[in-house]
Image (cartoon, helix red, strand yellow):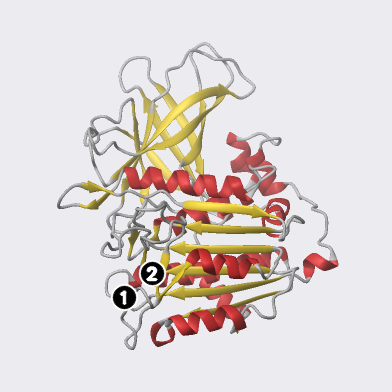
Amino acid sequence: MKKLQAFIFSFFLMVTVARSQSVYELSFTFPEAANAVTFKACYTDAADGKGKLRLRFAAPGIPDSILAELDAVEELPDLNSGCINSNRVYYKLQNPKYIESKDPGIIFPKYFCFQKDTATGFFEPYGITNSSVECNAEPVKFSSTRFIDQQSLTKEFVLTYFKPYDLFYRNLFVTNNPKALTTNERNVRIFLLIVANVDDPKIGPADRKNMYDAIAFFGKIKEFLGIGDFIYDTITGKRLTKQNVENAIKTFYAPAGPNDIVVFYYNGHGFRKPTDGRPGPYIDLKDKNNWRIMEASASLEDIYATIRKKRARLSLVLGDCCNALITDTNPLAEPPAVKKTFGINWSTENCRNLFLNSTPMSILGAAASPSMLAASNNNFGGFFSYFFRTSVETHFSFAKTAVSWDQVFKQTAEQTKYKADRTYCDNATKRKCNQLPYYRIERGRF
């Protein structure tokens, strides 16, 4: 059992936590031919497949500069018929609106293109175009691009593209005074037990990445809320046996009370037992002394039922593993496109609504529904784990209101499925991934 010390926590934050805000300043001329308009732009997104493009430009016959906004929505290629370029990602630009100005009849581009920088692995702004059909064709390239880090987000810069009443501006510069935590809330503790098959020759690196990311993520939540404690333990390597996991579930969570948060997180191989019709998978806990997988396994549903009996404030049971035949195995696939990012400010109220809600909740979240596999990447981790953390952070932002776990898992499932449907899990046979997370949320104690 470990408590996350401050210096260790700082290290984890530097190397593992998903930094979820991207901001770029750009300039371009579009279209390139007659009636061209030169734009200065600010692109923002929160790593959830959606963004905003603010445009500042001058229109013929209008003395003042015009400010407009376009929604940007990630549009991955259709593997059945679309053009495939794994080094590019296109965002569809739609729903134009004008900020304190009228429509001057300007034609906007329809797609924003990111291209992978082979030196860093990050996807960087590359250009704009009217179509993503020819994904290898050259777009109209940006004449300048600049990544805006947190230190560069000065009032002067932000007010070039945003108004003081915009959420983006208010998130950065308006002091929010949330209601102080009650004594009961300040005493909340997070108990995190991670079971991870980090030594597996195929998926071990991905499981290790998931493990470190989870420790940093829940530690960050503890620090942000200012609650009582964050206590975690990991079962890996030679400790990874069915007996040790069963014992840990009994002893590690023993101090947890009805005011606490209890999290169980499994990363490894999983499968279905044909005699068990429940939707949750079985987790593979075999070791060198017990290779009979049907015996050396545990039902995630049973673990969930046991943990729910703790009657904690929040019980969260997560399994990033397959949920198919015992002979199937986790596919390794291309990771989602990652951009340069930095940490966004969190809303205390939103964080509180999820983790300190007065209504007790129990949640079972599995990476794959019955008969499906869970995809991962050894440098990136599991698709489910990544999109879960991204969804939680998105719902912590000031752009969200009245947040709930239903919204968090709905976004997690949608983004995981969207990515899986547009990713090959077997490049040789061109077999698409097939993954839709399963989740169940139960409210109240029983």
Q: Amino acid at mark 2?
A: Gly
Instruction: Where is residue 374? Give x, y as percent.
Output: 36, 57
Instruction: Where is residue 146? Give x, y as percent.
Output: 44, 46
- In this orientation, which residue lies closer to the viewer: 386 or 69? 386
* Residue on which disc 2 sits: 268
Decide: few, some or many residues near mark 2? Use Cα within 10 Å; few <14, some 14-19, many ≥20.
Answer: many
Number of marks drawn: 2
Identify the residue at horizontal 50%, vertical 31% (top origin): 71
**Which of disc 1 and disc 2 is earlier in sequence?**
1
Q: Is residue 292 left or right of residue 366?
A: left
Is the residue 169 above or below the residue 104 in the image?
Answer: below
Is the residue 227 above or below the residue 136 in the image?
Answer: below
Identify the residue at horizontal 47%, vertical 80% (top origin): 235
Check if mark 2's residue and mark 1's residue have beta carbons within 8 Å: yes
Instruction: Where is residue 401? Give x, y as percent.
Output: 68, 42
Is the residue 406 above or below the residue 283 in the image?
Answer: above
- In this orientation, which residue lies closer to the viewer: 98 or 428? 428
Residue 152 visible (yes or no)? no
* Residue on which disc 1 sits: 200
Residue 97: which quarter of the image? top right
